[in-house]
Amino acid sequence: MIENLYSLFLDSSGISTDTRRLNKDSIYFALKGENFDGNNYALDAIKNGAKLSVVDDISLEGKHKSLIYVEDVLDTLQKLAIFHRDKQDIPVIGLTGSNGKTTTKNLIEKALTLSYKVLATEGNLNNHIGVPLTILKIKDHHQIAIIEMGASAVGEIELLSNISKPTIGIITNISNAHVEGFQNLDGVIRGKSELFNFLLKNNGQVIINNKDEIIKNFSKRFTDAIQLLGEGSIVQAQLIESVPNLKFIIQEEIFESSLFGDYNFQNILFALTVGKIFDIDEKDAAREISKYKPEDNRSEKIYEKSNCIVLDAYNANPKSMTNAIKSVDKFPNKNKVMILGDMNELGSDSKIEHENIGVLTKKLKVGRCFFIGKNMRYAHKKNTSSLWFEDRDSLEKEIVKYNISNADILIKGSRTFQLEMIMPVIMKISA
């Protein structure tokens, strides 16, 4: 079945999963979600130019010559991706971690593109659907693939590794992100280490972030692990300063990135290390990496009047929130304004982790601190000089009364809050 479907795939324009963005002559996979069933759009997909529709609703069997019925559409998509991956003899860099995955992926792509045709995960296509879709985009001209893997439960990285079959593996760091799905930090460790387990069994190469105490322990399992820093490292970059911009030096040449924070220097080192593995000159890679500008609400630096706004509203967990607060606190402006939303998926750790944010902002004497969300109320109780709001609308009604000048402003919270939506108000009150 998969072999026949693969022949049809090779003769198509690729895979589509959304009839609103349907490529002509593609194969439409009728995936299901919590609030939709792709089977309902399978016939529309064919009418709108799809070559075939793969469905798992038995009532559709035989309804059209261009319908293919399978028991499980998602399982079929994943098996098709595995079949395709097995045909590709190219290095695949598998990348996971609690924080910094997308930034690291983008930096690695910048370095490798200097000498290779690279395919990298687009956007947030890093789950059980996104990874097979990315694998199925590998074409004959691609020389290296970079596959980002996200997970919120034990077993998910193992699945994604079996689909993408990485030859090189990176775990950026491990902390209590998505701990609700993993149940506890031990679950996070087990889940993320599934990438290294795959590489160990399949003679793959790993790059160890030996700055991370948890990941450092994995070194013992490998005889040829490359270390990110110090002895066992293959790059020579040294950090000069981390805020407001990262500056680092390689053989007396200084490079400046628009990224900030020690943690982003680690992401840069990953990219330089991967570049070195593939014989890309360190300085050439560093120059290219330094051109990278964060976007998509991930640590974007926006200057408005006398203010520097750090928009980091894509997501948040205790480690990334703490890193961002500490880094922005070291920025040069005297005034600090922090607009911080709930950190989701923390399970039983939620109360204490939000309290810790309150304690940190109090300790740093953040000038104006605005907390948003039911869990950030715990932070507000620990930092009573802050203001607390139930939702973004309530915050906007209050903050519009302010004039903010000569300030470093951090905007950070989990995706559900869409805190980037307050940017027009922040721009308006900037002076």
Image (tube, grey):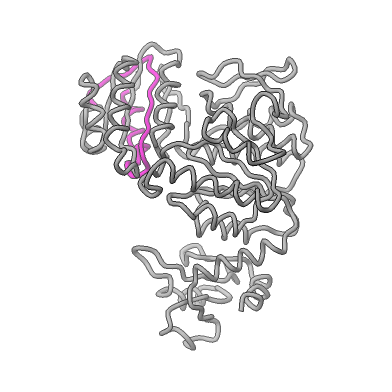
Q: Residue at x 50, y 48 (%)?
A: 150
Question: How many numbered badges does the structure rendering display?
Answer: 0
Q: Residue at x 54, y 71 (%)?
A: 76
User: Which quarter of the figure is the C terminus placed in?
Assistant: top left
Q: Quadrant of residue 354?
A: top left
Residue 388 percent location from the top left of the image: 21, 29
Q: Is residue 293 left or right of residue 339?
A: right
Q: Look at the image and give the residue range highlighted in magenta.
A: 400-429
Q: Residue at x 46, y 78 (%)?
A: 43
Residue 426 percent location from the top left of the image: 33, 28
Q: Nearer the viewer, residue 262 or 9?
A: 262
Q: Is residue 264 left or right of residue 229?
A: left
Furthest residue in direction front, as rendered: 220
Furthest residue in direction top, as rendered: 334
Residue 324 percent location from the top left of the image: 43, 27
Residue 257 percent location from the top left of the image: 59, 25
Q: Residue at x 56, y 47 (%)?
A: 148
- Verify whether residue 270 appears in magenta: no
Q: Is residue 269 above or below residue 38?
A: above
Q: Is residue 119 above or below residue 302?
A: below
User: Which quarter of the figure is the N terminus placed in?
Assistant: bottom right
Q: Quadrant of residue 107?
A: top right
